[in-house]
Amino acid sequence: MKQVSNFMSLLKAGVRLFFVLSVYFLYTNSSLAQLSPGDLSYAHAALEGMSNCTKCHVLGEKVSNEKCLACHKALKKQIDRQKGYHVSTDIRGKECTSCHSEHHGRKFQMIRFDKDNFKHALTGYDLLGAHEKLQCEKCHKAEFIGDKEIKKNKNTFLGLNTDCLNCHDDYHQKTLSTDCKQCHGFQKFKPAAAFNHDNAKFHLHGKHRDVECRLCHKTTTLNGKKFQEFSGIAFASCTNCHKDVHNNKFGQNCTKCHSEQSFHVIKSMSSFNHDQTNFKLENKHRDVECKKCHKTKFTDHIRHNRCTDCHNDYHKGQFTKQGVSPDCSECHSTAGFTSFSFSIEKHNSSGFKLEGAHLATPCFACHKKQEKWAFNNIGEKCADCHDDIHKSYIDKKYYPQAACKSCHTVDKWASINFDHAKTGYKLEGKHQNPTCRACHFETLANGQQLQRFGTLTGNCNECHNDKHFGQFEIDGKTDCMKCHDFNNWKAGKFDHSKTHFPLDGKHINVACSACHKEKQRGGTTFVQYKINKFRCENCH
């Protein structure tokens, strides 16, 4: 029995040795090389072994993009959102393996590209200014990645967002907008080239424009860091920054006497109250130099009952009726001659009633066409003020006597009430949305605009580019309406069963782009729809 037991032990040991040697020869002979052309890289080393092949490969086919993206979920999420480098025109539609091949050994780098000539704009973020000079590693590092899962990956280029503060410290410590581009440029942070102090609550005028920023915006320390104050600075009163040399003798409103042009220039005789006279100074009169009115002594009597006692009649008697000229104060005030009290109601009682856009038209547009203002006999018809730009382009039957109101309204020049069906070409679907200029005005190479009204025939290619590069031309013309309608550019009327290759079976579910690829001809990219070869091996 003991001999039998020893024999069985030797037999079992022999079987184990045979199995080990069989596995060894199996993994070292040439037949395995035909199945596995080489070791996987470190990134995919966990997928080594014949039992894992179908995790990347489809039996009988090459590596599947879908299987790649099933593992690379962060990249798939970005592609699904149509963002990033992999949806750019240079990469979209390519197989993953065309750039990232495998089985070249453990140390093989699957992600390789020319960093010096890489087109970063294809990622959706164009490198400008100083960004263009940085090494990739300055931005693409783990500490700038917010997604915890992506951060685990080594040497990844995913996970960054384009906010300035994603990479840069907030020097202003949340006291200003986080959109750094509102003030700073890409060349350098100082000076803030895009900042305009006129956009701040305190506008710089006069001598304030010459003051160094640091004199108002002090540099201090906040939260243990160097900090320059740009917000929360008091400016309601001059004395917030300036010392009151008059010790409050004249109140805190320095602007009563001084201006921002110079403290040494006095606006007027500050000690004299003109309101105590029979002529109260108001508005613009307060800014007039005393000697402009008081040409001799200040105590001499000055006529002041009518504006024309001091001012010339600028309108040269245009408003004189029955020998009597109205006083300027009937329309103007001391706030300035450019302001007036002549109301819309008064204008509508004249021979020309203001309506629509004319209500918003400034007076000078009609009444100051020349050097001087004119109020009499300036015209009442549209053509008296507006150029007839359609003259000789539009048939007179559509606007008899050059009456602009045949098409336009006084509410808005671009608002057209013309019935296009009268021309024999009824506007339908999306054609109802574009402005008239979109179809009837053509900008030439020299910038000149050419009007096209009677010359249009209604063919689609008169206005639209043939994106199909002449594939559907018949006798030199492309009839877009065979596939498209007026509602959108989708080929809603297209029926594949009427082509030379009707779709049936599995072909029905195949995406159009799988068969109809983008082509280039003469620098133009287009989709090839006309396919002349229909044998199975032409595609498969």
Image (cartoon, rainbow, N blue to C red):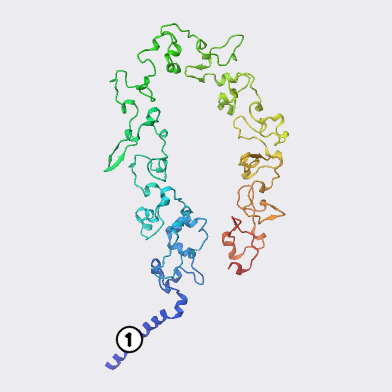
Neighbourhood count class around disc 1 (C-alpha, 10 Å): few under 14, some 14–19, many 20 upward: few
**448 with respect to 242 (left or right):** right
Q: Is residue 179 visible?
A: no
Residue type, label 1: Ala
Q: Is residue 384 left or right of residue 57?
A: right
Name the quarter where the N terminus is drawn: bottom left
Above or below residue 184? Residue 502 is below
- Residue 110 drawn above or below residue 28: above
- 94 vs 167, left or right, is right
- Asked if residue 539 can be seen in this view, the reply is yes
In the image shown, does 137 or 165 lie closer to the viewer?
137
Please tell me how many numbered marks the rendered image carries: 1
Residue 322, given in percent of the width and then of the height, sits at 62, 9
Q: Which residue is mark 1?
A: 13
Q: Determine the image quadrant of residue 301.
A: top left
With respect to residue 45, does 291 lie above or below? Answer: above
> In this rendering, is residue 371 above or below 470?
above
Q: Nearer the viewer, residue 202 or 312?
A: 312
Residue 510 on image: x %, y %: 57, 62
Query: In the displayed structure, does residue 310 sit left or right of residue 436?
Result: left
Residue 424 point in image, percent of width and height: 71, 41
Residue at the spot x=30%, y=40% of the render? 227
Quadrant holding the C terminus: bottom right
Residue 366: image location, x then y, percent: 60, 24
Q: Nearer the viewer, residue 432 or 207?
A: 207
User: What is the secondary structure assignment of the residue under circle 1?
Assistant: helix
